[in-house]
Amino acid sequence: MSANIQAVRGMNDILPDEAAWWRHFEATVEAWLERYGYRNIRMPLVEHTQLFRRAIGEVTDIVEKEMYSWRDELNGEDLTLRPEGTASCVRAAIEHNLLYDGPKRLWYAGPMYRHERPQKGRYRQFYQIGAEALGLDHPHVDIEILVMLHGLFTRLGIKDLGLQINSLGDSACRGAYRDALKNYLQAKLPTLCADCRRRYETNPLRVLDCKVDADKFGDSPVMLDYLCGPCKIHFQTVEEGLKKLGVPFEVNPRLVRGLDYYTRTTFEFVMGHMGAQNTVAAGGRYDGLVKEIGGPATAGIGFALGVERAISLMDTTALQPPRPQLYIAALGEAAVDFVLPLIHGLRSSGIRVETDYTGASLKSQMKKADKSGAGHTLIVGEQELKDEKTVLRNMQTKEQVSISLSSLVEELKIKLVGNG
Ligand code: HAM
């Protein structure tokens, strides 16, 4: 016997019971986003590698170590499975000139791919629901997004998430901070890993989120102390707005994000007890990204929610699996033949019907009917066909009624619709 082929490590099957929860979760999040004016956009899973290099940054963990990239020899193209959605969403907005008539709020959902070491809460294929507000630079948009997420988590019954915010400044103030950081890092260089020493030269901000050395930088200078006037006012407005609207938060001046495109407000919703993989949703402003990817200078802000992580925090015991309204126990070959058009007719009328076409004994089929959780079972055997009537059993009350074959579909519709 040949060896079993299993799923790729870090890429998970979502089995039906779990998938029911996913659908409930997705429907709740989508309705919530649409309430805030976000409209759905669907981008491809594969993009030109260059898009992510430019958007996320050459010297980041994602681009240097985590992307699934390959060369498509047929077309001579360098391609990558998307590690996140912001770059693709902004690319699509530019390519289709979506901002021609003003700002847009967009949301997307789907799998993302990062070649990380899999562990609980960290997968190689994981799902995000993300939202991007393009062309809106007012700090009230930052507040709106944070209020929206806070409300969403409450609605989903996810409690105890801490909101951490920070400002990463903009191109006007980043330079002075970068210099201060380089000064600070210089003395530490000999004790740092090879990646950090290299990044010190190419992208010193990324030294701060090094997975090896991160805890060595507890006393590093922080961007908040270097903000220029407009960035400072922007951040204060966000803080005040959150207070006014009753959204609890903490300023974390050491919140750096792993992607280079961020400017000004950045944030993470963090769960205390989830260990290293404790960020459930994260994002921020990226006022330079649209231009970086080739569009006109346009503000942007957004977030992505990790679906696996969010669902792991929900109480999933409450959701009932969907049940058929009717189980059909067809006993013997003649009955199995007879029920084929009947089932088709009932399903066409919107009734959820289950059956197994085995023609097995009444006892065994009643067991299956019980297991299916159906509200009613229709029993059709040879005797019933001869008598031109069938028996409908209410699975809860055990009450049985006889229904004539000539009016079967009509009677079942009356009895079962609205009785699911
Ligand atoms: P990110 O912080 O890289 O940001 O990812 C956002 C969320 O995706 C994380 O907080 C986490 O919940 C989930 N996540 C990330 N990597 C994994 C993984 N390997 N396994 C499971 N879950 C994971 C972004 O992706 C940005 N595009 C967010 C954004 C949108 N910023 C502005 N707009």
Image (cartoon, rainbow, N blue to C red):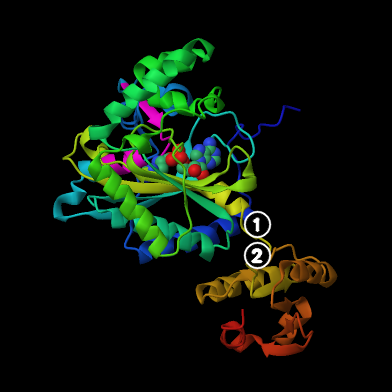
Residue 342 falls left or right of residue 132: right
Q: Is mark 2 in CB contact (under 8 Å) with mark 1?
A: yes
Is residue 297 at least partly visible in the picture? yes
To which residue does mark 2 refer?
321
State whether residue 338 is above or below residue 5: below
Q: Is residue 257 left or right of residue 262?
A: right
Q: Which sits in the foreground, 338 or 201? A: 201
- Between the residue at mark 2 and the residue at mark 1, the CA separation in whole angstroms equals 7 Å
Q: Residue at left 40%, top 65%?
A: 245
Q: Badge 2, how many Cα within 10 Å: few under 14, some, many 20+?
A: few
Q: What segment carries the magenta color?
A: 77-92
Task: Identify the element where label 1 is drawn.
Answer: helix
Q: Position of residue 159 (x, y in %)?
A: 59, 59
Q: State which quadrant residue 13 falls in.
A: top right
SS class of the residue under badge 2?
loop
Placement of 117 over or under 249, stated as above or below? above
Q: Which residue is mark 1?
A: 17
**Residue 376 in the image, given as x and y percentages of width and height:** 70, 79
- Residue depicted at 55% across the width and 53% down the height: 161
Quick check: 115 above or below 306?
above
